[in-house]
Every structure is written in structure tokens, then in C-alpha cells.
């Protein structure tokens, strides 16, 4: 059975069930109708604004998280005292669902882009920080010794030995962080925003415009899939020498 | 200075930074350096917390969240481990299911709420199923990777010394995969908590997420902080419990580093 | 099998599998007889198939044609037990549970298999570590557990696949002595694969030299050094002469093997 068979089978079953009213077509419109709705809305220019909004929030969140997380993570990985000081705080905050911080940010920053972007940024930040710090801390000390032995010091050592050695972990952290940022942005839009793809799903749900709702859903799924697969491909090209990328 | 004293002092070091932060916050808030509207004094929050625990309101919300969390986690974990093992052991199963899962996994669980509530009229069941979605995939993939990364020589040796069929599954495959399964369960539990809170924020009247959201809407900031702290404590306790369980059940292995997951 | 026949009888064994460009022959028409209680060592260049041969005897790899027969002297006794190069202990079981694993799978009742396992651990000097986990042991100790596990299974033939290769030189010497001692005490038939000529001559009654791939038996060298044999045997002139003789022929095969790799490097 080829890989695509199961999803195709399920879609076909759904199509038939909806058309024959085995399931209510009001709540579960046939996939063909959904696909048609999506293409109609896209060509009519409907989703583009919200998609752009979601993407710009994502970009903002990711940039903030990366710019804060990577340097701090590298620092934590390289200097034990810093790691020892911050680790307990990180460990305490890590299990907290960052989405619970949304109301706090809404109060501090008002109802607006800031709160949304920040919530997503914090979620991604912790992942990037943990991955980077962990990867840097576990660099094979023999690599560093060998580097020093061949004359690399200070900035050169950092640039030519430490950074490349930490790169797989950093990129994995960035990849996971981007995925988390996207999920959080959409979840936040669903819960609290008045624009964006996540919000669209919510709005159509409330108005019971199920065709449109599923179309937005589909778009989000494709975006997510594209982001995940795309980033893994980028990581694979950038790090040809790394063996295992992992499934996420 | 004798050794034991030094070590005891070292254990307290991790608490220094958070304690300093709390003290600084208390002072700043009390003296108006930080606006109490946004950052009420920790002492006020603590007092409100204790009051709400005393009159049972907080525990009622907490209990509800924990109940939903448990239901969702069981829904995610039990099928998740089973499917993960199957996908790890059989290439055909993996190739058959992977495309479907890869499509569904990146979607935030919370978005499934509309779909699920269409299909399941019972509200609590809908919440549990929604929260179980992504966690299910997390458990599946972590378990599957665990099976794939098993040391093949160990499995071969076990078969060579006579373990076959059911014996092999129970005495070799399961214990060998247990560390990976545990990591998956830990990740899944963490994620389930996130989604339960998110769903409560969207559509529930009671529960920690609902408490959080509603206090924000009526601008009762201290109550919001109480809810936030409770959620944080819940998360920490859960993580600690899983770690404790891991140390008891799997004394031979440490946690797989999350770096390259 | 006829009475008085060999313990292990390998006849015209060929092992091949599909490779990148057609059929890859690992072993070609190997024939070998091993007598009961004999200690036979297999040597040869890397990739000659000596481990494959062992694995076929153990039932871990399949053959294309030919026969492998192992005489069962006592019903219920497993024909073989293997000691793996990377010890392959089950990490979630204690040392004692690991050693008991084979008899456990054969349904031997607990008191009996536990007593047997403790005896084996005594033999390899690890009685105090019965309740430890493998990750708490050193490489040498883990390998000793591997040996105890194989012996605890009471096999007709003990198979050892470069068991000391992953250890440091000093541990290796100590374990060589132990293996000699164990073999003298238990009298079990052993087929032993090694890279080291010195080790093969130290331990074996016969040394079987395999050619480069496809592996064939190039020559069988009887080892006329007396028993009991200790490490001091390495110092004797006969030992040195034997090493030279075998190495002269082994060297040919090693060079052939290197040449083949030069022509056909791994992609």
C-alpha cells in the first residue's frame, strides 16, 4: 500500500459520507467542496490579508525568540556559572504553558500585536534556549582541545570550532522553535485576536460557515506542513555532515 | 569547612535568583516603582491564593483542569504507544500512517475543537479529544523513533538466547523501548496541559484556563496571577512526577537529551 | 550423525547475499570439522567472512547451500551460545538476570537457573556484581558477563566473535588467561574468531586461516604447543615460528583484501 493511500481513502470515505448525508454535510462538507471553497476564496483575494498577518506575527515572534535565545543559549552552554544560575529558573518556567501568559501580556501591552507576538516569542524562546544551551554544553571537549592545539584562540576558536560544532543543535532548536511559534500564533489568534488565519477559523466556526472554516483549516495545515518539511530540507542542506535530523 | 555543610549550601543556590526577583518585585510594587495595576505585590497574590484555596474555589478549578488533563492524556498515551510500537516494528505500517500523521501533526490541537465538537456533542469529551490530538502524535513519533534506534545487536542476542514471540515482546522489546516511551509521555503530558488550558481559555466556564481568561476580561489582575501561578505549579509538579516515576521504573537509563529530538 | 563423529560438521557451506552489483559471495564452499572439546580459532583479513561463518553456525545468518551440523550430546541442550563482540547485554536487566536469560527462556525453574547463574558468575569472578546493571560495569566486566551468560546456557558449542577486540590491551591479556582457565575446567567445544594471530595461537588447538572475500579455507594450522598453556607460551621459540608462518600466508590475503577495496571503495 503506497504512502498516500490512507489519506486518499479517508478523503474518499468522507466525500461519500457527506454526499449521502451519512454525516451531516452542514458540519462536515465534502472535501471537494472544501477545496473549491479554498480556491475560490484565494482567487478572490480573501485569505491573503489574514495569511500575511499570521506570517508577519510569526516572523516577529521568531526573530525575537532567536535573537534572544541563540546568544543566551551559547553563553549558557559555554559558561558553567551562568548555566547554574539560570538553569533552575528555566526549569521552573519550562513546564508552564506559555499560552497562559497571554492574558498577562494583554494587560501589559494592551490588546494588540505586541501581546500576540510576545506570547509566541516566549514559547519559541524556551525551546531555542534549551536546544542551544544543551548542544553547546555537550560539544565534545576533545574538539575544542584539538582546535586549541592547532592554534585557534578566542574569537577564531569560537568561529571555527565551537559555532560549527553547536550548529546542529542550534538549527534543530530554531526549527522546533519556528514550529512552536507558528502553533502558538495560530492558537493565540484563535483565542484572542481579531485577524489572522487562526482567528478566521474561530470566526467561521461561530458563524457556522463550515465550508470556509475547513478551507482556512486546510490552508493552515498546508502552511504548517510546508514550514516543517521546508526547514528540515534547509537543515539537511546546510549540514550535510550531520547524520540524523529527526522526525519533527 | 566540612563537606556536608558546603553541599547543603549548594543545594539552596538555585533558589537564590528567583527569591531575589520576588523580593525586588515586592519592594518595587509596594513603592510604586512598578505599577500595582500590572504587577501586584507578590504578598497580595500569595494572600489571595491562600484565601481561594481555603474556600475551595481554586481547588475546584484545579480539579476540573486536572480531570480533563488526565482524560486527554490517557486518550493520547495508550493508543499513542500502541501505534508508535507498531510503526516502529513494521515498515508498512509506518509508510501507511506517516503521510496522514505528518499532515495533521503541525496543526495546533486547539483548532480541532470546532471539528471535534461537531462530531461529539458531549462538551467534556470534546475537550479531552481535542487536547489529545497533538500529544497523540508526539507519543507515536517518540515511541516509533525509540524502536528504530534500538541496538539491533542486543535484540539479536536476545533472540539467540531463546526469546521469541510474546516472550520477546514482553521481556525484550518493551523494556528496551521504555526510556523512549517515557520521553514521549513526558512531552505528551506537557503538551496536553498546554492545550487543555488553551481550550479552557476559549470555551469553558470553569477550570484554570477559564479562570485565567475570565479574570483578565473583568480586569481582576490579582486573580489572574493566582491562576497563572497555579498553572505554573501544576506544570512543575507534573514534570517532577514524571521524572520521579522515570527514576523508579527505569533505573538503567537517563532521559534522551531533547536537543536533537 | 554417526557415533564418534565430529561435534561440529560444516560441509560445502556457501553464504551469499544480493549486493550492489549482483550476488556478493561471503563464504564459498567452506568445509570444516570440529572435534568435541576442541578449541578452534578462525583468523583472516577483515571482511573475509569469519564472523559470518560463526553467525551461520549460531543460526543467526542463513546459508545459500551446504550443511552445518551440530551434534547434540544431551537432549535439551542448546546447540550453540554466542559471546558477542559488543557484549550485547540487556541493559534493563541486572547482571544476574542477564546470565539467567537463556535458561529462563528454556523454562528452567528459578532456583535451578539462579544457582547455575551464580556459579557462572563465580567462575568469571563477578559474584559481587550480581545485582549491578550493565551500565555500571567496565568493558572487561561486561564481556565477562557475556561469557558467563553463554556458559550458563550450557551449550554444545561455545561461539566467540572477537570477544576481546573492544577491550584495552591489559584487560585483554587478563581475559585471555581466564578463557584458557575456563576452557580447561569446563572442556566445552569452542569456535573463536579473532583478528590477532597471537591470541589465536595462545588459545587454540587449531588455527583456521580464511582467504580474502569470497572466504575459503586457505589452510588449517595445528598448534603443537602443550597444554596447560599459559601466557609464558608466547615467549617460546615455537610460538614465534608459528606466528611467522601463519602471518606469511595471512599477509597475502590482507593485501588482496586491501587491493579489492582500492578497486571498489565504499561509496
Image: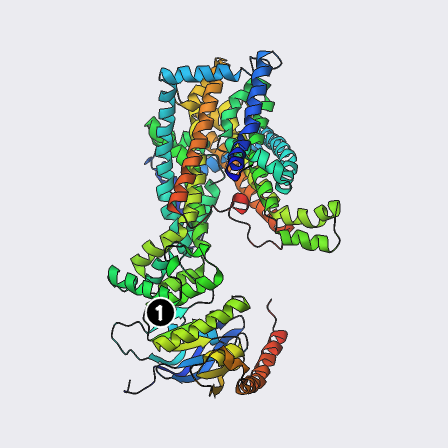
Question: Which residue is located at x 35 percent, y 29 percent?
Answer: B67
Residue A173: x percent and y percent? 58, 41
Specify few, some or many for label 1: CA neighbours under 10 Å numbering under 14, 14-19, or 20 or more: many
Residue B236: x percent and y percent? 45, 32
Q: Looking at the image, can residue A42 be seen? A: yes
Count of labels in the image: 1
B241 lies above or below A167: above
Q: Which chain's residue wears label 1?
A: C
Question: Which residue is located at x 36 percent, y 25 percent?
Answer: B64
Residue C174: x percent and y percent? 48, 70
A210 lies above or below A10: above
Q: Nearer the viewer, residue C16 or A216?
A: C16
Q: Quick one: quadrant of the C terminus of chain C?
A: bottom right
Q: Nearer the viewer, residue A88 or C127?
A: C127
Q: Looking at the image, can residue A30 be seen? A: no
Q: Nearer the viewer, residue B53 or B189?
A: B53
Q: Nearer the viewer, residue C106 or C224?
A: C224
Farthest residue in the front direction?
Answer: B1
Residue A108: x percent and y percent? 58, 18
Left or right side of B48 for A194: right
Q: Quick one: quadrant of the N terminus of chain C?
A: bottom left
Q: How is the image coloured?
A: rainbow
Question: Which residue is located at x 47 percent, y 67 percent?
Answer: C85
Regarding mark 1 in the picture, which secondary structure is present there? helix
- Residue with the mark numbered 1: C151
Left or right side of B81 for A128: right
Determine the image quadrant of residue A111. top right
Left or right side of B52 for C214: right
Amino acid at each position: 500500500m503506497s504512502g498516500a493511500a490512507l489519506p486518499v481513502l479517508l478523503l474518499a470515505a468522507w466525500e461519500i459520507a457527506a454526499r449521502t448525508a451519512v454525516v451531516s454535510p452542514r458540519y462536515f462538507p465534502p472535501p471537494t467542496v472544501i477545496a473549491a471553497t479554498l480556491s475560490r476564496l484565494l482567487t478572490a483575494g480573501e485569505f491573503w490579508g489574514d495569511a500575511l498577518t499570521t506570517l508577519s506575527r510569526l516572523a516577529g515572534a521568531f526573530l525575537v525568540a532567536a535573537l534572544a535565545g541563540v546568544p543566551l543559549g551559547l553563553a549558557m552552554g559555554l559558561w558553567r556559572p551562568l548555566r547554574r544560575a539560570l538553569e533552575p529558573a528555566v526549569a521552573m518556567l519550562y513546564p508552564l504553558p506559555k499560552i497562559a501568559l497571554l492574558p498577562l501580556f494583554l494587560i501589559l501591552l494592551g490588546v494588540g500585536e505586541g501581546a500576540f507576538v510576545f506570547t509566541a516569542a516566549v514559547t519559541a524562546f524556551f525551546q531555542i534556549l534549551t536546544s542551544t544551551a544543551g548542544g553547546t554544553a555537550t560539544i565534545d571537549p576533545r574538539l575544542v582541545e584539538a582546535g586549541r592545539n592547532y592554534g585557534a584562540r578566542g574569537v577564531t576558536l569560537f568561529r571555527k570550532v565551537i559555532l560549527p560544532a553547536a550548529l546542529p543543535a542550534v538549527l534543530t532548536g530554531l526549527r522546533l522553535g519556528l514550529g512552536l511559534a507558528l502553533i502558538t500564533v495560530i492558537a493565540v489568534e484563535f483565542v484572542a485576536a481579531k485577524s489572522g488565519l487562526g482567528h478566521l477559523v474561530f470566526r467561521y466556526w461561530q458563524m457556522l460557515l463550515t465550508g470556509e472554516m475547513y478551507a482556512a483549516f486546510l490552508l493552515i495545515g498546508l502552511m504548517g506542513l510546508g514550514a516543517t518539511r521546508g526547514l528540515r530540507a534547509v537543515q539537511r542542506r546546510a549540514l550535510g555532515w550531520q547524520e540524523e535530523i529527526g522526525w519533527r | 569547612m566540612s563537606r556536608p555543610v558546603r553541599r547543603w549550601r549548594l543545594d539552596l543556590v538555585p533558589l537564590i535568583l528567583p527569591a531575589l526577583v520576588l523580593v525586588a518585585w515586592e519592594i518595587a510594587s509596594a513603592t510604586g516603582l512598578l505599577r500595582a495595576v500590572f504587577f501586584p505585590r507578590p504578598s497580595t497574590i500569595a494572600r489571595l491564593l491562600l484565601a481561594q484555596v481555603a474556600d475551595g474555589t481554586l481547588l475546584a478549578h484545579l480539579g476540573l483542569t486536572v480531570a480533563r488533563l488526565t482524560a486527554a492524556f490517557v486518550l493520547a498515551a495508550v493508543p499513542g504507544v500502541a501505534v508508535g510500537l507498531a510503526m516502529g516494528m513494521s515498515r508498512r505500517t509506518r509508510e501507511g500512517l506517516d503521510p496522514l500523521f505528518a499532515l495533521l501533526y503541525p496543526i495546533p490541537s486547539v483548532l480541532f475543537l470546532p471539528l471535534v465538537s461537531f462530531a461529539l456533542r458531549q462538551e467534556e469529551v470534546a475537550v479531552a479529544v481535542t487536547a489529545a490530538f497533538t500529544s497523540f502524535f508526539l507519543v507515536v513519533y517518540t515511541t516509533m523513533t525509540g524502536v528504530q534506534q534500538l541496538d539491533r545487536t542486543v535484540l539479536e542476542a536476545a533472540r539467540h538466547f531463546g526469546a521469541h514471540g510474546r516472550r520477546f515482546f514482553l521481556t525484550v522489546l518493551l523494556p528496551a523501548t521504555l526510556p523512549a516511551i517515557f520521553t514521549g509521555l513526558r512531552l505528551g503530558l506537557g503538551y496536553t496541559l498546554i492545550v487543555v488550558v488553551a481550550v479552557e481559555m476559549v470555551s469553558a466556564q470553569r477550570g484554570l484556563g477559564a479562570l485565567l481568561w475570565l479574570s483578565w476580561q473583568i480586569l481582576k489582575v490579582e486573580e489572574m496571577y493566582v491562576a497563572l501561578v497555579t498553572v505554573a505549579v501544576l506544570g512543575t509538579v507534573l514534570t517532577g512526577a514524571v521524572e520521579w516515576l522515570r527514576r523508579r521504573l527505569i533505573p538503567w537509563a537517563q532521559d534522551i537529551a531533547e536537543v536533537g529530538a | 550423525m554417526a557415533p564418534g563423529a565430529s561435534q561440529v560438521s560444516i560441509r560445502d557451506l556457501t553464504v551469499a547475499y544480493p549486493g550492489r552489483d549482483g550476488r556478493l559471495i561471503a563464504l564459498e564452499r567452506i568445509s570444516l570439522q570440529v572435534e568435541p572439546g576442541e578449541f578452534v580459532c578462525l583468523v583472516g583479513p577483515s571482511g573475509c567472512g569469519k564472523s559470518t561463518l560463526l553467525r551461520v553456525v549460531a543460526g543467526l545468518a542463513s546459508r545459500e547451500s551446504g550443511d552445518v551440523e551440530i551434534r547434540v550430546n544431551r537432549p535439551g541442550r542448546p546447540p550453540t551460545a554466542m559471546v558477542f563482540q559488543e557484549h550485547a547485554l540487556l541493559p534493563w536487566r541486572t547482571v544476574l538476570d542477564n546470565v539467567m536469560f537463556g535458561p529462563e527462556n528454556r523454562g528452567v525453574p528459578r532456583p535451578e537457573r539462579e544457582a547455575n547463574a551464580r556459579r557462572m558468575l563465580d567462575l568469571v569472578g563477578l559474584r559481587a556484581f550480581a545485582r549491578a546493571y550493565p551500565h555500571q560495569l567496565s568493558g572487561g566486566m561486561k564481556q565477562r558477563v557475556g561469557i558467563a551468560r553463554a556458559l550458563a546456557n550450557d551449550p554444545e558449542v561455545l561461539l566467540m566473535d572477537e570477544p576481546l577486540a573492544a577491550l584495552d590491551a591489559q584487560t585483554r591479556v587478563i581475559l585471555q588467561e581466564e578463557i584458557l582457565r575456563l576452557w580447561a575446567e569446563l572442556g566445552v567445544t569452542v569456535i573463536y574468531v579473532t583478528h590477532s594471530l597471537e591470541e589465536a595461537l595462545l588459545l587454540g588447538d587449531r588455527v583456521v586461516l580464511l582467504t580474502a572475500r569470497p572466504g575459503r579455507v586457505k589452510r588449517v594450522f595445528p598448534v603443537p604447543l602443550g597444554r596447560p598453556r599459559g601466557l609464558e607460551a608466547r615467549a617460546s621459540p615455537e610460538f614465534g615460528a608459528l606466528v611467522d608462518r601463519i602471518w606469511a600466508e595471512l599477509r597475502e590475503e590482507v593485501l588482496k583484501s586491501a587491493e579489492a577495496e582500492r578497486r571498489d571503495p565504499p561509496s
